Amino acid sequence: MAMLKGPNVFPRSEYLRRLAAVKHEMQRREISALVVVLPANITYLTGYTAKSGYVPQGLIVTLDDEEPIFITRRMDAPAAVHQMFIEGGRVIGYPEDLIANPDKDGWDALLGMLLEAGFGTARIGVEEQTLSIQTLLKFRTKAPAAEIVDFGNTICWIRGIKSDLEIALMREAAVIADAGMLRAKEVIRPGVSEADAAAEIIAQLVRGAGGKQGTDVADFSLCASPRTSTAHISWADDRFRQGSQINIELGGVRHGYTSALMRTFSIGTPSDHMRRLHEGEVAGLEAALAAVKPGATCGDVAAAFNKTLGKFGFKKESRCGYAIGIDWTEATASFKVGDPTVLKPNMTFHMMLGNWVDEDLGYVISETLRVTESGVETFSILPREIFQI
């Protein structure tokens, strides 16, 4: 029996709107066919979230066809038929003999389809940053008469301004993130293993909240004493104890869309040094949020934070945030000094104020936010405090 189509996350008109924006850029650059490779961009244009990007796959967008064609491993094709808004016949699964084959792979199948479709002498766009040097060489040698051009981060920038439908999903994801952090507050206790706490928190992120379940598990960091100066590690084979500090970064996920959240926990009274850092970070966060508005730049937001934090005698070496949406990070704008990106309504960012001051002092707090018509909306409703156990 043929794979049944699943319910689409967005209406067909939403996907066609996104494709139209991509095709507009293709026309401007005189590109006849575009090969989309970045999994998050494939999700954006089709609704596909299955984890098949570990082998060659690509979405072929052409100017003349309303719907794209998706080329993937044959075993992953049913998932694409089920999730994508496109007609099932436009999902093409290449055979298993192209897997772990030293002579040819799925890119050969994709290129063969492009050539058969008449694009052998066309201008073909690719997301070069996602492809290996060997794969780019294959594109140029297999299609010598075509002009292979880099489409860069174009789709990522298009994704940067969310539709109201996307914002609704990110709000749902934020409710789940809040629930996960509140579950952490319930389960972190002296003597509890970090693994048991992580299991409870992640379970909450999967179960969801607000009547919506989590549809995936995002990156999860639990950095407890004595590892609070670390940024991106998971739970350790250890237990919490009196005096432990715990820095948590998690995200709620709804159909690929992520809302991230960071908070610091303390079992017992935090040190005076930690309290001063917390006060500076919260003041900086509020100053940065006040700077978020259409027409301001990402650099303006970072400058507001850094200036305020400096008044408390601290500094933050890493950026203050980044664009967020599908699969957490969007490789575009950052809240860092000098970033000229102009803020526009419905841009979304993770204002990530994790600050790893030295080898024995680290602290985290963050908000996922939306640029509004006149200012800013933060998605979390949790207090901006050190959660004391």
Image: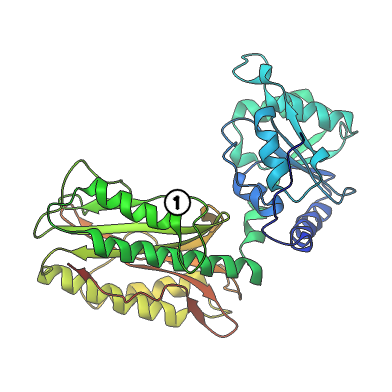
Residue at image location 25% in from the left, 75% down from the top: 280
| Res 335 seen here | no
**Which image quarter holds the N terminus?**
top right
Q: Is residue 76 left or right of residue 148?
A: left
Determine whether 131 is above or below 185 in the image.
above
Task: Spot the residue most to the front.
Answer: 1
What percent of the width, then of the height, locates residue 59?
A: 73, 41
**Which image quarter holds the C terminus?**
bottom left
When asked about the image quadrant of residue 381, the answer is bottom left
What percent of the width, then of the height, locates residue 314?
A: 23, 69
Residue at image location 37% in from the left, 80% down from the top: 287
Q: In this view of the protein, which residue sits in the foreground, 244 or 143?
A: 244
Residue type at mark 1: give it: Ala
What percent of the width, then of the height, locates residue 283?
A: 30, 79
Label 1 Cα neighbours within 10 Å, binned few <14 / some 14-19 / many ≥20: many
Determine whether 27 is above or below 94 in the image.
below
On the image, numbered disc 1 is attached to which residue?
Answer: 218
Label total for image:
1
| Res 51 seen here | yes
What percent of the width, then of the height, locates residue 125?
A: 75, 42
Q: Is residue 271 left or right of residue 184?
A: left
Q: Is residue 10 left or right of residue 23?
A: left
When asked about the image quadrant of residue 74, the answer is top right
